[in-house]
Every structure is written in structure tokens, then in C-alpha cells.
Amino acid sequence: MPNERLRAAMAAGGWTYATLAERAEVDPKSVERWVNLGRTPRRSTALLAAEALGEDIHTLWPALRQARSAKAVSAELVTLYDQRADVPVSAFVDLMAQARERIDVLVYAAIFLHESYPRLNELLTERAAEGCAVRIALGDAESENVRQRGEEEKFGHGIESRCRLAAMHYRPLLGTPNIEIRTHGTTLYNSLYRADDQMLVNAHVWGVNAFAAPVWHLQRGREGGVFDTYTQSFDEVWKTAVPIPEDK
């Protein structure tokens, strides 16, 4: 049975199979099947298409509402990676490069970013110059929670030195308008990488290094949803964090 809701939404916006396929990152034949055969795409693809059309995902594909109810899958979940090592560094970089309003990073060290993408500071400076507010929260190498994490992950004192190295990487950004660098001593349940309404969440598992722990890509949906839960968590940690001294 044809999907008349989708057909009408495409007609109203002047969308063709090819143009919608490009935005949804699929083949035009897939879009044709959605319209003419009533096929239902996977949720992450449907989210891209619905966002492009300016429509509610469940209005276009009611079956996804039923699937969500049956499987308890959040509509805000775009992708789930088994471990951070599976996530290409370009995913982190592209996320930040597309930010227009806000970039928030909450980690202990995450020096893999600078090691894999040496232009990170330049990218953040460019975003800040365009008016994007950048907040980086790094682990305080002197905190008990950082020391404890090192023992749990069998890093010993390694994670403390990585926190110091992360601070060294970011220190050249101190004093740059729209960029703030702070350190925190909280228990880090998840590392967060937010850019506007997109976020990569690196879960932390006891005894497992962050690179081997899962990552989920979230896209902000309804107010008060999963995405907002993590942004509120960042804000609470940020309140406890202290600026890095420029001369340290």
C-alpha cells in the first residue's frame, strides 16, 4: 500500500526520490519503495528523512511508533557502536565542524582526538570565531576519582599523566574568545561530545578502557528526552569545574 503521507510531504516540499535519498543517505530506489510500496526504513534513516521534510517520524511511518513501544528503542538514538574504537575519528571531527551554537566536551583525557586530528585546536578556534560557544571539561589529574579510575582500568598512574597531557593540548586555547577550558574531579560515568543537537556518548564500564566501551550517537528529539538528560549532566559537572590556570 502506498505511503500517501510521505508522498504528500515530498510533493509539498518539491522533493524528488533523488534529493530525499541524498539527505537520507540511501539509494533513490529505497525512497521509491517507501512511497509506492509503503516500506518502512530503519529508524536512523527515517530520522534523517523526516528531519529533511520537516515532518514527525511517526506521522510518516506509524510502524516505527509501534516498534519503539515493543522494543523500547529511543527515537533519539541514531547509531550504536560496540566500542569507541569502531567510531571513526571523522565522526567526532565532523560533529564539531558542523556546530554553529555550542560544542561541549566532558572527558578525563580523550587525547586520541588530538593524536588523530592535530588540527583540533584550529577547528575549535574557527568555530569559536563564528560565535560557537566551546566548553571543554577535562579530568583533574590530582583528583581521587581520576586516580581511582586508573586503578579500575589497570592504568595505574597512566590516566593521571594523560589528563595532564590533555590539558597541555588544550592550553594554547586559553584566552580565546568563546572558548573555556576547565578541570573537574567528578566520577565520570560517560564521556560526552556534544555539537548543537548531536552528541556522541562514550559509556564507561568498570575495568574497561574507554576505547573498548560502547558509544551511542544521539540526536535531540523531544524536550526532556535522553539527549537533554546528558546535557543537564554536563551542566552540573561544569558548575563544579575550575578554569585551568594559564601559567600552570
Image: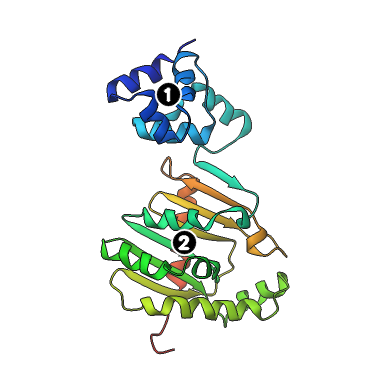
Which residue is at 40% across, 89% downward? Answer: 247
Which residue is at 49% across, 70% downward? Answer: 114
What mark, if any, has residue 59 been given in the picture?
1
* Amino acid type shown at disc 1: Thr
180 lies left or right of 164: left
Q: Position of residue 116 (x, y in %)?
A: 52, 66
Asked if residue 165 shows in the view, the reply is: yes
Q: Is mark 1 on a helix, strand or loop?
A: helix
Label 2 or label 1, whichever lies nearer to me, is 1
Which residue is at 36% across, 34% downward? Answer: 52
In the depicted structure, whether residue 242 falls above or below residue 105 = below
In the depicted structure, whether residue 79 falls above or below residue 146 = above
* Amino acid type shown at disc 2: Phe
Which residue is at 53% across, 22% downward? Answer: 63
160 lies left or right of 39: right
Query: In whole angstroms, how far apart are the C-alphas of marks 2 and 1?
Result: 32 Å
